[in-house]
């Protein structure tokens, strides 16, 4: 087992410090005055709850100027009032672009893997969204059945796209993908059909906007979250090469970030595709900073609420109209949030996954919730 000094030396091989002017942002009540920064030497990082990592990489995308985004986001984030008196955040600086894009991918994957092994949540400031493959790969030795949530207007399964690489990765430890906020005029029907055949959860923008609270259970079961700023409409986030006249509002994307933060299970957060060259009055960098603020605020409002963590639950059993298995629900007395039990090939392999009250009301009518059906198909394999 490596010593703290050896681990720190490994991190230093991949990381570079942030500019010294960031040390001037030391107003006590702000995030900049609270976060421990890598400016002259790598700080004591193993006791942190969360760690910021910038990635100055824009290759692999037409949105190349994303390489300059991390420090622009930092500049705005440091000015925000700290979301919690318990904030324990370290800024580990930036991963510089390697000789090849693959070099950068490897560096990010290794840094995230080291943080995850110490139960520290990496917050990745991209950089192109293709870096999300490294975010995924860092879980290889950490999680057996990984669930990811991706918020983006575009979904692609092209050969070199990060999502295709994730789906085909071996060894396969991917359990589920929630593709949230996609827009049908950007995504071929065959792509959605492929995701549905794999029992994943694509949710188009119109459905999401009409039922934002329905995304909370999805994030509650998520291990890693990917936020592509292109999911936000241009008026609220102009700093993107592929600017989008339609999309989510800034308030909606921040709500999703809060859901991601409050999830007991979520262990990795990535923000991608902010392009300062197109960013009118730094609007998008400011929004990126606010998204991270809401993620941090959610993190420090976690409730320790799960059927495996305490016994303060009410149990309900719903019988289906046809011969499908009964659906067992659990309602928390602490938070009034809901879970449902997914049968496995043996009782020992049953899963308990988050759901919403609407899933329960549907089951009381004898109808199987879609979330239950999809999870059942995968869990019985």
Image (tube, rainbow, N blue to C red):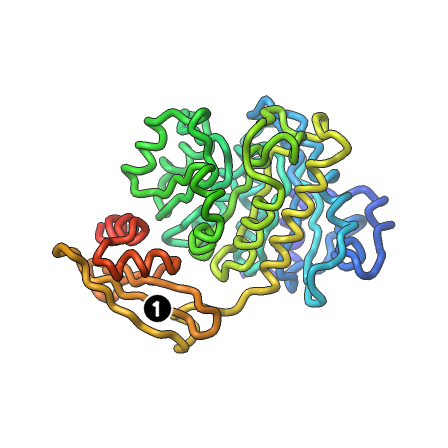
Residue hosting label 1: 330
In the rendered view, tell whether residue 325 sits above or below residue 194: below
Q: What crowding class fits label 1: few (fewer than 14 Cα within 10 Å), some (14-19), or many (20 or more)?
A: many
Depth check: 111 or 278 in front? Answer: 278
Coordinates of residue 303 in the picture (x, y in percent):
53, 68
Q: Secondary structure at mark 1?
A: strand
Look at 46% across and 49% down and name the residue there: 139
Quadrant of the image occupied by residue 94: top right
Residue plotted at (80% across, 61% down): 29
Q: Is residue 188 left or right of residue 248?
A: left
Task: Give residue 217's position: percent from left, percent from top.
Answer: 43, 56
Where's residue 38, x and y in %?
Answer: 75, 50
Q: Nearer the viewer, residue 326 or 134?
A: 326
Residue 10 vs 131, above or below: the answer is below
For the view shown, which residue lies furthest in the bottom direction? 311
Q: Quadrant of residue 196?
A: top left
Q: Residue at x 71, y 45 (%)?
A: 93
Residue 97 appears in view: no
Does the rendering let one see residue 42? yes
* Residue found farthest to the left: 323
């Amino acid at each position: 087992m490596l010593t703290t000094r050896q681990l720190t030396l490994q991190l230093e091989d991949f990381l570079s410090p942030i500019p010294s002017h960031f040390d001037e942002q030391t107003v006590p009540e702000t995030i900049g005055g609270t976060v421990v920064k890598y400016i002259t030497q790598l700080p004591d990082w193993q006791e942190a709850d969360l760690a910021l990592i910038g990635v100055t990489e824009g290759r692999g995308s037409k949105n190349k100027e994303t390489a300059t985004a991390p420090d622009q986001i930092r500049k705005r984030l440091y000015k925000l009032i700290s979301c919690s008196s318990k904030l324990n955040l370290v800024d580990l600086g930036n991963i510089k672009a390697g000789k090849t894009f693959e070099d950068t991918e490897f560096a990010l994957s290794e840094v995230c893997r080291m943080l995850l092994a110490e139960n520290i949540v990496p917050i990745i400031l991209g950089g192109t969204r293709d870096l999300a493959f490294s975010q995924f790969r860092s879980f290889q030795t950490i999680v057996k059945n990984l669930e990811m949530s991706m918020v983006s207007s575009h979904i692609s399964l092209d050969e070199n796209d990060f999502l295709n690489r994730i789906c085909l990765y071996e060894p396969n430890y991917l359990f589920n993908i929630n593709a949230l906020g996609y827009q049908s005029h950007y995504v071929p029907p065959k792509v959605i059909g492929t995701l549905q055949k794999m029992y994943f959860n694509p949710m188009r923008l119109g459905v999401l906007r009409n039922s934002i609270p329905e995304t909370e259970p999805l994030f509650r079961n998520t291990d890693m979250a990917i936020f592509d700023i292109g999911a936000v409409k241009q008026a609220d986030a102009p700093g993107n090469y592929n600017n989008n006249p339609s999309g989510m509002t800034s308030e909606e994307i921040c709500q999703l970030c809060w859901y991601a933060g409050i999830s007991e299970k979520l262990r990795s957060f990535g923000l991608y595709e902010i392009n300062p060259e197109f960013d009118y009055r730094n609007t998008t960098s400011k929004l990126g900073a606010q998204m991270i603020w809401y993620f941090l605020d959610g993190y420090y409002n976690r409730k320790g609420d799960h059927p495996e963590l305490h016994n303060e639950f009410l149990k309900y059993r719903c019988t289906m109209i046809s011969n499908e298995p009964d659906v067992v629900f659990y309602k928390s007395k602490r938070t009034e949030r809901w879970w449902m039990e997914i049968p496995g090939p043996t009782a020992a392999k049953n899963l308990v996954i988050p759901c919403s009250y609407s899933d329960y009301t549907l089951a009381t009518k004898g109808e199987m919730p879609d979330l239950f059906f999809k999870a059942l198909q995968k869990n019985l394999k």
